[in-house]
Structures are given as structure tokens and as C-alpha cells.
Image: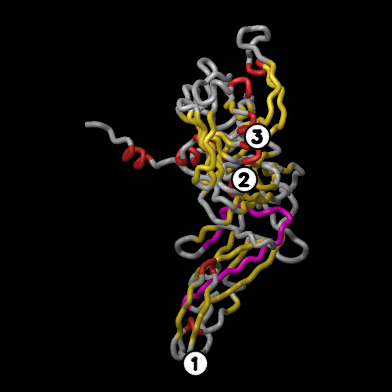
């Protein structure tokens, strides 16, 4: 049907556009059609969602809104659920159709606000509420955030462990969009898929000192893949302390410990000898153990060989899961500061190890330079995430698309 503007007596009108689809009109008195209050656009638009009589929409299907009046058009659509989550969507260029592009949640209530205008330019409005049904399957995708709540160093990544593996990129995109990490102060960061069940999140640079970090999920009730829906997830809150970083120079046999950019202690050390060189790169403190019994068999050295050992070790700060520590090594004090004689750990006097043990916390940074050892891997042996540059880190996100063919050609021009 065609709707004509109502009679009005006004003089001028200014239209104010507000983001997220709200339109506000500020008018004096004129006969311009935009000066009127929005008319009821019920007969001008149609929805594919059932309304009333206890009927519920299928969350598997996208929401569609169509302009029924050939002379009118849809100008804006805002759809939110009861928790305030917005539904992304696309409006056709001619305003004849809007459809959702992000999945609807199951067992949820939605409010949809549609703005229109008729052939004479008069604004219309329709508000619709509807419910979605429960999913037809009981399969749920659980997410567990890590580490446990607490205060960490600025190198600590946030982790997310899924209850089921996901290989499909479309499903990964749904999950990644729903897993949120926000910090105060705000920083740029992204998720990286370590494997089919594990994601790690880190900012472009280290976290700011004394930041508050929150991780939460909007996945509940969202369809992830065929017969798989998002489940409830417990949110996580972390804080960071001072920026504490230990820089170990294997060639100089010295460690400099920094707090918020200033050197607070320099320590003579010994690192891995030839054949057992300490790994280069950035490592993150995983934990602290006052006493550890270290046996050579744990790193593949046969018992009874010339390199075998079985030692009580104190003030051990762990930096890899395979057994690399910063620890007290009173048996090598004669070499500390002058030679590398360990089997890969960083050794120091008992007094210095006790000081280091009390100074650092999980998430603090230990960076090794000038060693002949391999580079610390990004994953699999602790937290080596910081050894990936930002560009390569982003490649692990399902939401970051690679360069276009034109961009690849520009970055790698063909020689004449």
C-alpha cells in the first residue's frame, strides 16, 4: 500500500542521524513530510519471524525483513537480544530487503526496530519482538578461559580451551567473534588458533603494567556448526603488576632485571654449555617451585653417563614445560659470570636465586639473547607467543584475511 504524509503545519526541520540506527528529528513548523512523527509501518514491511500465539523462530534461519510497499523502502534496522547483543545484517541498496549476517541465538528474545520511508519521503517505524526456539540438539560447545583469575606479569596470554575440536573456518569465525577480551587501558590484540581446540590471545605489544583484563563469551545459544551450539562460559578477570623483565645475555654471562624499564639488579649467571645451549628468545614465567629434584634422565641423558646428574635444586623459577628453570646453582658459582656450564638452565648463586624467586611472578618475562641454542617455540613448551611478530600472530586468527592478489603482487613484484 502507499502511505501519504499527514497534514502538518511547521516551518523547518533538521534531521539528526545517530549511530546504531536511531533517527531523531528536530523540527519547528513547516509542511515538510519529515517533520511528522513516524507513522506505523506495519503494513509496509514483512518479517519471516513468527509473532504471537507462542510461535518461535528457527534460530538456524537468518532474520529477513522485506519492504512490501513498492513506493517505500527500509532505511535502517536494529536487532538486539535481551542481553543487548546486536545482530549484524545487510540492507540492500534499494532498501527493499534486510537480512541478518550473524547467527541468532537459540532460546532468546529479540527486539527489532525497523525504520522506513514511503514514496513521499515520510518516515515510518515498526518495532517487533519475537522469540527463538531451543536448538534441536543437545550438543554444546564449552569454553574454559585461562589462566585462573589473579595478578600476572605483562607477558601472560589469555587462553581459551574448547570442549570440542573445530576444523571448519566458518565455525572458527563464529567462535572467535564471540570470545571477547577487553582491557583497561585498551590495547590492540587478537586470538590465535594454536590447534583445533585451543586459542591464545595476546596484544600487539606486552600488556600495560597495572592493567585490568576481562575475557568473556557471547557464544551461549549461538549456532557454531551443524548440530553444535555454544554453551555457557565462566568469565575471567586478570590484572597485571609491574612490568618485570629479565634479560639474560648468554655470551656476557649476565642477567639484567628490569622493573618498569629501569634496571633493578644485575646478576652473574651461567647458561647452557655446548651441546646443551639455552634457548634464545622470550619466555614467560610459568610458575615457581621452592624445591625441585632435577635428574638428567628427564632430558634424555642416560643414568651413569659422564653428563648424568641428580641434584636437589632450590628457588626454581620455571620458564618451559620441558624443564628449563632459573634456579640456585651453588655448585657452579666459580663459573657464574665467566662461563656457561649448565645443561640448559640459567644458574646463579643461592642468594641471587632467592631474590629472583621473590621478585618475579607468573607472566613475567625472561628473554635470552646471544645463545647458540634454538629459538624458543611459540607454542608447545610454555609461552613463547612473543617470539612471533605481530603479522605472523595475526595469521593465526580466523577473522584476519590474507592479502588480496593485488596486494601480494605489490608486496612481491615480478622482476622484468
- The answer to whether residue 343 is above or below residue 15 is above
Q: Is residue 126 left or right of residue 274?
A: right
Instruction: Report helix, strand or loop for mark 2.
Output: helix
Residue 75 coordinates in the image, percent (x, y): 50, 68
Q: Is residue 154 left or right of residue 132?
A: left
On residue 9, which mark appears? Answer: 1
Residue drawn 49% across the image and 46% down it: 261
Residue drawn 74% across the image and 42% down it: 139
Label 1, label 2: how far apart the Cα atoms are: 53 Å
Label 1, label 3: how far apart the Cα atoms are: 84 Å
Q: Earlier in the sequence, mark 1 or mark 2?
A: 1
Q: Is residue 333 left or right of residue 391?
A: right
**Looking at the image, is mark 1 or mark 2 nearer the viewer?**
2
Residue drawn 58% across the image and 62% down it: 65
Instruction: Report helix, strand or loop for mark 1.
Output: loop
Magenta segment includes 404? no
Image quarter (top left, top right, bottom left or bottom right) of the C terminus: top left
Label 3, label 2: how far apart the Cα atoms are: 43 Å
On residue 175, which mark appears? Answer: 2
**Looking at the image, is mark 3 or mark 2 nearer the viewer?**
3
User: What residue does disc 3 label?
Assistant: 354
Image quarter (top left, top right, bottom left or bottom right) of the N terminus: bottom right
Amino acid at each position: 500500500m502507499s502511505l501519504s504524509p499527514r497534514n502538518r503545519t511547521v516551518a523547518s526541520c533538521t534531521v539528526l542521524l545517530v549511530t546504531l540506527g536511531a533517527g531523531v528529528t528536530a523540527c519547528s513548523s513547516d509542511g515538510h513530510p519529515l517533520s511528522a512523527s513516524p507513522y506505523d509501518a506495519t503494513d509496509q514491511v514483512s518479517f519471516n519471524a513468527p509473532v504471537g500465539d507462542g510461535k518461535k523462530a528457527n534460530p538456524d534461519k537468518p532474520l529477513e525483513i522485506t519492504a512490501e510497499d513498492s513506493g517505500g523502502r527500509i532505511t535502517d534496522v536494529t536487532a538486539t537480544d535481551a542481553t543487548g547483543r546486536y545482530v549484524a545484517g545487510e540492507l540492500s541498496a534499494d532498501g527493499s530487503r534486510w537480512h541478518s549476517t550473524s547467527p541468532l541465538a537459540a532460546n532468546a528474545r529479540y527486539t527489532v526496530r525497523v525504520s522506513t520511508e514511503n514514496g513521499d519521503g515520510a518516515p515510518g517505524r515498526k518495532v517487533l519482538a519475537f522469540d527463538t526456539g531451543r536448538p534441536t540438539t543437545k550438543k554444546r560447545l564449552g569454553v574454559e578461559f585461562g589462566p585462573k583469575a589473579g595478578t600476572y606479569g605483562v607477558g601472560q596470554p589469555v587462553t581459551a580451551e574448547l570442549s570440542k575440536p573445530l576444523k571448519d573456518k566458518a565455525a572458527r569465525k563464529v567462535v572467535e567473534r564471540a570470545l571477547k577480551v577487553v582491557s583497561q587501558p585498551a590495547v590492540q590484540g587478537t586470538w590465535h588458533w594454536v590447534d583445533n581446540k585451543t586459542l591464545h590471545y595476546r596484544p600487539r605489544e606486552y600488556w600495560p603494567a597495572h592493567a585490568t583484563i576481562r575475557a568473556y563469551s557471547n557464544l551461549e545459544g549461538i549456532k557454531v556448526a551443524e548440530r553444535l551450539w555454544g554453551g555457557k562460559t565462566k568469565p575471567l578477570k586478570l590484572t597485571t603488576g609491574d612490568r618485570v623483565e629479565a634479560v639474560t645475555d648468554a655470551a656476557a654471562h649476565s642477567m639484567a632485571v628490569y622493573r618498569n624499564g629501569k634496571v633493578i639488579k644485575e646478576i652473574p649467571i651461567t647458561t647452557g654449555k655446548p651441546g646443551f645451549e639455552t634457548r634464545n628468545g622470550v619466555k614467560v614465567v610459568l610458575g615457581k617451585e621452592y624445591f625441585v629434584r632435577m635428574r638428567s634422565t628427564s632430558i634424555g641423558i642416560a643414568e651413569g653417563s659422564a653428563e648424568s646428574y641428580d641434584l636437589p635444586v632450590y628457588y626454581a623459577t620455571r620458564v618451559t614445560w620441558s624443564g628449563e628453570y632459573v634456579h640456585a646453582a651453588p655448585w657452579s658459582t666459580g663459573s657464574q659470570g665467566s662461563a656457561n656450564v649448565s645443561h640448559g638452565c640459567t644458574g646463579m648463586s643461592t642468594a641471587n636465586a632467592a631474590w629472583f624467586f621473590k621478585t618475579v611472578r607468573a607472566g613475567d618475562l625472561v628473554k635470552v639473547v646471544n645463545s647458540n641454542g634454538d629459538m624458543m617455540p611459540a607454542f608447545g613448551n610454555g609461552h613463547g607467543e612473543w617470539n612471533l611478530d605481530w603479522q605472523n600472530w595475526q595469521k593465526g586468527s580466523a577473522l584476519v584475511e590474507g592479502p588480496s592478489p593485488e596486494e601480494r603482487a605489490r608486496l612481491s613484484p615480478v622482476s622484468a
